[in-house]
Amino acid sequence: MTTKKIGKQTVALANPPSIIGHANVVGKKEGDGPLADSFDFVNADDTFGEKSWEKSESAMQKLALTNALNKAGQSASKMDYIFAGDLLNQCIASAFAMRGQEIPFFGLYGACSTMAEGLSLAAMLLDGGFGEFTAALTSSHFCSAERQYRSPLECGTQRTPTAQWTVTGSGALILAREGEGPYVTHITTGKIVDKGIKDASNMGAAMAPSAYDTIKTHLEDTNRSPSYYDLIITGDLGTLGEEIVKEFFHKDGMDLNHFGDCGSLIYNHGKQDTHCGGSGCGCSAVVLSGYLLNGMRAGRWKNILFCGTGALLSPVSTQQGESIPAISHAVAISTQK
Amino acid sequence: MTTKKIGKQTVALANPPSIIGHANVVGKKEGDGPLADSFDFVNADDTFGEKSWEKSESAMQKLALTNALNKAGQSASKMDYIFAGDLLNQCIASAFAMRGQEIPFFGLYGACSTMAEGLSLAAMLLDGGFGEFTAALTSSHFCSAERQYRSPLECGTQRTPTAQWTVTGSGALILAREGEGPYVTHITTGKIVDKGIKDASNMGAAMAPSAYDTIKTHLEDTNRSPSYYDLIITGDLGTLGEEIVKEFFHKDGMDLNHFGDCGSLIYNHGKQDTHCGGSGCGCSAVVLSGYLLNGMRAGRWKNILFCGTGALLSPVSTQQGESIPAISHAVAISTQK
């Protein structure tokens, strides 16, 4: 068997798996935003009926997974593997959501790139012949993230202009070896890129060089121009990070005409006071599992390059004066095999 | 192409990848223990020349990886993928160790099961044709784990009789599509098992039911008896957890005659005051990458079932009164394809 590797960091899947189901749940603020129509469930008070924000996050994951399985017409017991992760210390939102699911489980930590990471591995295991069905699942919650990474909400700490707003939401994808499109056709796995940014309130700038690196590598590896894609979309660079990536490509003499960012799309910047936009594991997950995949099904886009972006810092690394390592994984999704 | 899945949760690899290099580094206490001869590098003061315990952990990972690459006769630039994880919040030991390595990186969180999880995915990606070389890497550090999970060392907090001692160490494995044995032949991916244990100082009891579940499923899926293996070894159940697993199998009328636990083996219980033995991501990693794989190469064992064990709790989940979800992944390693 020959390798599926093309170029430096990309694989071309031999039998592109099908995304047979996708669903999401979000909180109130996301439900008030411009992508409201693409969310399957909006919770009015962000608690999802639970007593702690961490438990709310697990509840969101369970709801998103159940919904995605329903849409796919499958049961949890049919899943050969699930890949899940979140931003909480020790990824407890995922571990606790997986209790009682009876699905072989691989836990991931890729910060906000986790949906792209999970989708990559879920697709590769199917293409490699290791099963019939896989799932990818992530979540984030504004309230659990704020108290863990920054300060308790009760403090009312002021946010800097470059800050982003952690999305309250969870997205789930169900993949199958056989089925109709959209299909996962190519995967470009990212390397750590760290250009020395130390400001934990400026994730966009910290992650932009890594998104640029992965997208550029993907285009070189596949010998495609940006215009091959109807949309190249990053996970949660926000408005500032998005501009930086465009600028990098512009300097290369390559203009990204169909480029966007899930974090820039999810809120109404003028009205929702989210500064640079959305972030968090849930951000790219809910936009992919709603707006993007619904749009592909509706014929709006044929070829998308989905590039999850993650900032691999922690409060401890920030306190110890470390800069922020970032990683981005790109997944090419197409309505055709 | 037919699926490689056999039974409920197991895959039989079509072209078992070779483990072409393995190396480890440990701290002083581990170097004073009964497995001293199997460690490649023992640091005298556990700092590994760094100013914080978190940075020491990253330094250990880099050292273990470099050493394993050297033994494999390969360079980092040849690695198609690396899977790495650790116990620190946001897995910073791994993310920071990966800076400058230029290897496509998948971050994992599987608590102390991470080496088995990484080895599983590293082997599957090779068997699936996604590259020529992959690596798996994990670490833990007693001092960074104590202050994060329990209390700062300066408090001198007394430990309960069921407590285990987090291993200071890192282990790295280099896998290749082609090469000599030992080979990874079968993988059984675990599901979450939570039997309601809430005592964060009794990991052995929390993880034992999950180890039992995965090992039993592996034996059923492969239609093998325990005696097929020269050694069935768990990651870090410690002496209490090890006894619980033996008892479960005994009740099934199945006696595990060649059974052990990395956590029980790594320290001298009479003399080193570690209570129930070793634990942590580094525990099974340093025992696998030294004592076990060296022993296979020396002809001591032909077939090993390596079962990493993880307790997916966090200080927050314990404070919120949650029980401890556990997961175990089993990897069959053989000197023959």
Image (spheres, coloured by chain):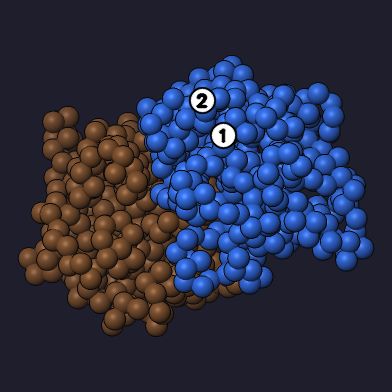
Chain colours: A blue, B brown
Q: Is residue B261 left or right of residue A22?
A: left
**Residue at the image point whose x is 69% and y is 39% from the top:** A272
Horizontal and vertical percent for residue B99?
Answer: 57, 69
Marks 2/1 in contact by CB < 8 Å: the verdict is yes
For label 1, the SS is strand
Q: Which mark is residue A23?
A: none
Rate crowding at label 1 as few (under 14), some (14 to 19) or many (20 or more) other CA atoms within 10 Å.
many
Quadrant holding the N terminus of chain B: top right
**Residue A12 visible to the viewer:** no
The answer to whether marks 2 and 1 sit on the same chain is yes
Residue at 39% in and 63% down: B139
| Residue at image location 64% in from the left, 33% down from the top | A30
Q: Tag 2, which chain?
A: A
Q: Nearest the camera: A174 or B219?
A: A174
Judge from the rendering whether residue A209 lies leftward or rightward of residue B305; answer left or right. Answer: right
Q: Is residue B15 left or right of residue B320?
A: right
Chain for disc number 1: A
Q: Nearer the viewer, residue B168 or A313?
A: A313
Q: Which residue is mark 2?
A: A63
Q: x, y (%) of residue B56?
A: 40, 74
Residue A40 seen in the figure: yes
Q: Amino acid at mark 2?
A: Leu
Instruction: Pinpoint residue A83: horizontal percent, then vertical percent.
Output: 52, 40
**Residue at figure coordinates x 9%, y 70% from the top left:** B271
Q: Amino acid at mark 1?
A: Ser
Read off the residue under disc 1: A170
Residue B47 location, quadrant: bottom left
In this rendered view, identify the residue nearer to me: A26 or A93.
A26
Does dot 2 land on a helix, a strand or a loop?
helix
The image shows residue A33 at horizontal and vertical percentages of 70, 33
User: Would you place residue B238 above or below residue A104 in this image?
Assistant: below
- First in residue order: circle 2 vs circle 1: 2
